Image (cartoon, coloured by chain):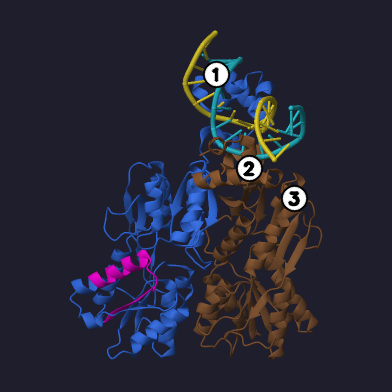
Chain colours: A blue, B brown, C cyan, D yellow
Amino acid sequence: MTLRQVASHAGVSRQTVSNVLNAPERVDPTTLAKVQAAIEALGYQPNRTARSLATRQAGLIGYGLAGSPGHSLFMDPFLHMMTESIERTGRHVLLFTATPGLAGLQTYADLIAQRAVDAFILSDTVDHDPRHSWLASRGVPFASFGRAWPDEGEQPGSWVDVDGAKACAELVSGLHACGHTRIAFVGWQSLTSAGSDRQRGWRAECERLGLAERDCVAVSADTDSTEGGARAAAALLDSAVPPTAIVAVSDLLAVGVLGEVRRRGLVAGRDVAVTGFDDSLLAAAVDGGLTSVRQPTAEIAATLVGLLETPDEERGVLLPGEVVVRGSAPLML
Amino acid sequence: MTLRQVASHAGVSRQTVSNVLNAPERVDPTTLAKVQAAIEALGYQPNRTARSLATRQAGLIGYGLAGSPGHSLFMDPFLHMMTESIERTGRHVLLFTATPGLAGLQTYADLIAQRAVDAFILSDTVDHDPRHSWLASRGVPFASFGRAWPDEGEQPGSWVDVDGAKACAELVSGLHACGHTRIAFVGWQSLTSAGSDRQRGWRAECERLGLAERDCVAVSADTDSTEGGARAAAALLDSAVPPTAIVAVSDLLAVGVLGEVRRRGLVAGRDVAVTGFDDSLLAAAVDGGLTSVRQPTAEIAATLVGLLETPDEERGVLLPGEVVVRGSAPLML
DNA sequence: CTGAAAGCGCTTACAG
DNA sequence: CTGAAAGCGCTTACAG
């Protein structure tokens, strides 16, 4: 089924059919109806490839899966929302895998050189992510989920992010309001921008509240797993002045912390308060529930796609996270 | 950067450059080297869209995200592996969303009509999934992760599946070997083919072992959540002759079962054995660990893509699941 | 308002 | 082994 067949069926030229599709206001109502009837009758749909070649638009937004096949709980809803948002603009998602760092840049470069995509959505950003500067310097449109430059305005391109610092500050102040003064932080070892953002908020609030520096210890989990979280918690709880509250950078690490707490005969939420981040399935699944921070997934996705519409103006959008209180840390907000 | 520029740079015709790319054996070694040098120097990569139009191949495999944005733990690794497998064949993944059932069929139809994809990979299959017959009847290549027809050979198209029936039978026999004779099943309410497959294996093994029918009760969780699992477990444990072992159709439901068990002062793995399915993050994260069944994700993905290579011959590949024993059910295998 | 022409950047038989 | 020609199925100015 091609334009040509529709044209001959309707008794008009191919260009007129094209006009019916792309500029219906320019065609005579009678002709319009006639052609639309033919389109309907034949079940015609324009060939995307041919259209792409003519318009020089792939109609595809590239999204690169991060390095290793993890078990991200955030991925399913995010991908879903992002894909839906992109589809609303008449385009689709081209999924690819790319190793993190400079090596993975080649994949982005290839996709652009081949004109396989029109733009990228970036996530799993790392500190000073090389992708941002590379893409920006070549004028490739993109939107980033996550900031990768600590200083506002330095980051190339548009971005959306959840205010992890603020959310963590809220957790700290909520814990403090319940009487906690020794509030530790369990972070990631890797230099993700989200990790440092969250840690920054935790530290800032501890300082603002005038908590003693030695009471606000940050440790890094040696692996991004429950085991890593458990080991980090063990180190913390073994210290001379153990914390009474532990703010973990992710739900997964928090679950590890919870396990270690339980193993020591302590009760989370009573003896030690524990919080996570992401409000993933884990947070609800864990016994007693894990206090966590929900990311506004649908809004993140919609905003990212919106930013893609205006590639020339660089903007940053900071979205609030929502503290979800559960048994592991009965906060006062 | 186009073929034309490479040609003029190398001092040959465009067709020769195309031959260098697509049939290097047909071109004179000297010319070959010269053209390749030009390609290298200019960093030329063929425009995918133009190539697609000429070859009538989109170079894209469609993958439809299931209905609702869930929090599937399996999705991240599966999508990763699948994307990698497809990339190894020089193609990419086109991601889209489709509502389940007949309504979603239109999305598949559109993609085909527009020639946006060459083939599909199907997952989240339901009983007598309408997609299979629809695609098969129009000669659209596809491979299905999951069987949707109970009887071998009836299913249109090629498929890969994990032998959930066998894995569940193994769980049952392992439990029986530990002395369990009252082994219940907690399933999904929805008619997923994976769900009925697993339940079938559980029931068959119970019968084979000669367990009393009233000791082998199956219930459906009213929602696919930990709460649903908990309610199902409550019903089971409240019955006159409560089970001593509960085989849940998924890790999520199993975690709900574990919660209910704990809430009643019972200890999982000692008073009641509990098993899940998927060996997701949850299984490892839960305190004491959840005995579960691991799906061979990488192999599934690779096989699916392999099946796509031979669209004319319909084949089915059954892969074994691997029982992973943890604290919630210390089986003897 | 409509249609003839050129072009998007490739590939694919087919002469030479 | 190499190149001239036609074509993939659209769109986009541009005449008429």
Q: Amino acid at mark 1?
A: Pro
Q: Is residue A34 above or below residue A228?
A: above
Q: Which residue is mark 2?
A: B31
Report the chain holding disc 2.
B
* Image position, residue A329 (x, y; %): 35, 77
In this view, the mark in front (2 or 1): 2
Quick check: do tags 3 and 2 share a chain? Answer: yes
Q: Is residue B17 above or below residue A220?
A: above
Quick check: do tags 2 and 1 share a chain? Answer: no
Q: Amino acid at mark 2?
A: Thr
Q: CA distance from mark 2 to mark 1?
A: 57 Å
Does any portion of residue A261 appear in the rendered image? yes
* Image position, residue A228 (x, y; %): 44, 80
**What crowding class fits label 1: few (fewer than 14 Cα within 10 Å), some (14-19), or many (20 or more)?**
few
Kind of element beneath mark 2: helix
* Left or right of A139 on screen, residue B61: right
Mark number, residue A257: none
Q: Nearer the viewer, residue A232 or A293?
A: A232
Q: Amino acid at mark 3?
A: Ser
**Cβ atoms under marks 3 and 2 closer than 8 Å:** no
Residue bounds of the magenta highlight: A182-204
Kind of element beneath mark 3: helix
* Left or right of B287 on screen, residue A217: left
* Image position, residue A223 (x, y; %): 44, 77
Asked if residue A191 is among those painted magenta in the image, a careful observer would answer yes
* Image position, residue D4 (x, y; %): 66, 26
Q: Which residue is mark 1?
A: A29
